[in-house]
Amino acid sequence: MSISISVIFVFCLSFISLLAFRKLAKRVGLVDKPNERKHHVGQIPLVGGISIYCTLMIALFILFPITNSLLLYVACSTVLIVLGALDDRYDLSFKSRLVVQAAISLAMILIGYKSLHYLGAMFSGSALVIPTYISYIVTILAVIGAINAFNMVDGIDGLLGGLASVTFSALGLMFYLAGKDYLALYCLLFVGALIPYIMLNLGFPFGRRFKVFMGDAGSMFIGFTAIWLLIEASQGQNQLVIRPVTALWFIALPLMDMVCIMTRRIRKGQSPFKPDREHLHHICQRIGLSSSLSLLVICLLATLMAGVGILSELYDVPESMMFFLFLVTFAFYFSVIANIWRITAFFKKTYRHTQP
């Protein structure tokens, strides 16, 4: 099957499964209801992630060679989808979710031999390889972090799908340039499966009556797939597709938003996993941007950061310089978000003084 036909197949299958699952979701109560944090209208089916998962699993077994690594990925993804669906339906405690996510991380390490052990030369002129057991801890934290980073950004229509598309497009390009055709194809198919969800999530083409949400099942599946592919790209045994520091740029915005929001919660004496309305997308709306404009601004920022990572690979920019630049970018982001109301008040005051 050609690449174009494969993408069309995945797109159509994703679209059909979304329409089918949304009807089933309403029958079993797998819907998102409005509350003090969620201001949408009506009960919205939480089937975006389940639909994307089913679509991609079918595509994997039809289009890809069956390997132990593929089977492990499918098994881990299935566990997370089931966990996410149960959380969407019954609102599980964050502790139970973390336990399962940690177990998935251990399966990656002990069964799939996938771990974050090579950090490259981001700290100095020589490459750093961390000890085995420390790499286990780093990997577990990275998997849990990536899963929850993508989960936390799912706050306005189209945002999770848009940010995921940026990450998988960047990864797909790098896999393609490195000659990793199957991994590049999977990234492309993932984006192809996301597009129908983004369309329905934004109310296109059938209007808000057919609206669907991703759900925790989908955000966990996306975050897990992202970290799986980032480890595959940056920790290869023979050939690195990207350097470890570049992985930070490919998920920069979800990662920065998660760290900022969790830091603010801890400072307030709250649980870092307590939901609130202080994420970047909420702030964008509270300073006056519409939901659509917030989506556009945030996705453009993510694309810019991913583009920086791609260019650093193509032009072989020193890893230590890219890591320093990432830290500077994160510090700037953290400072702006922490002082956003003062900055906004200053510009409003300045604007009023300049008016005749």
Image (spheres, rainbow, N blue to C red):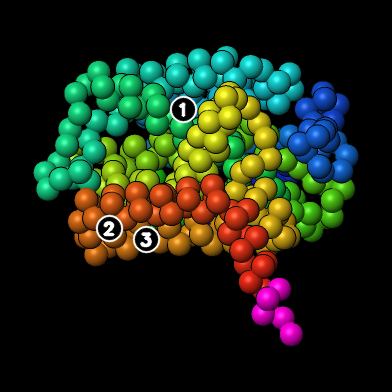
* Stretch of the chain drawn in magenta: 352-356
Nearer the observer: mark 1 or 2; the answer is: 1
In the current view of this chain or complex, which residue is farthest to the left?
126
Q: Residue at x 71, y 26 (%)?
A: 88
Residue drawn 33% across the image and 27% down it: 138
Q: CA distance from mark 3 to mark 2?
A: 9 Å
Confirm whether the magenta stretch covers residue 355.
yes
| Label 1 environment density (alpha carbons within 10 Å; few <14, some 14–19, many ≥20) | many
Amino acid identity at mark 2: Glu
Q: Residue at x 58, y 29 (%)?
A: 268
> Residue at image x 58%, y 36%?
151
Q: Nearer the viewer, residue 65 or 186?
A: 186
Pick whichever of labels 3 and 2 is earlier in the sequence: 3
Q: Which mark is residue 313?
A: 2
Residue 29 pos. (x, y %): 82, 25
Estimate the x, y position of residue 91 in percent, counting from the top left: 71, 20
From this view, report whether residue 129 is shown above or below residue 287. Answer: above
Give the image quarter of residue 55.
top right
Q: Earlier in the sequence, mark 1 or mark 3?
A: 1
Name the mark nearer the viewer: 3 or 2.
3
Per the image, the residue denoted by label 1 is 144
Quarter of the picture holding the C terminus: bottom right
Q: Quadrant of residue 325?
A: bottom left
Q: Is residue 7 left or right of residue 49?
A: left
Question: What secondary structure is the magenta-colored segment mainly?
Answer: helix
The residue type indicated by label 3 comes to Val
Element class at badge 3 = helix
Left/right of residue 2 with respect to residue 238 in the rendered view: right
Secondary structure of the residue carrying numbered label 2: helix
| Tag 1: amino acid | Ile
Residue denoted by label 3: 308
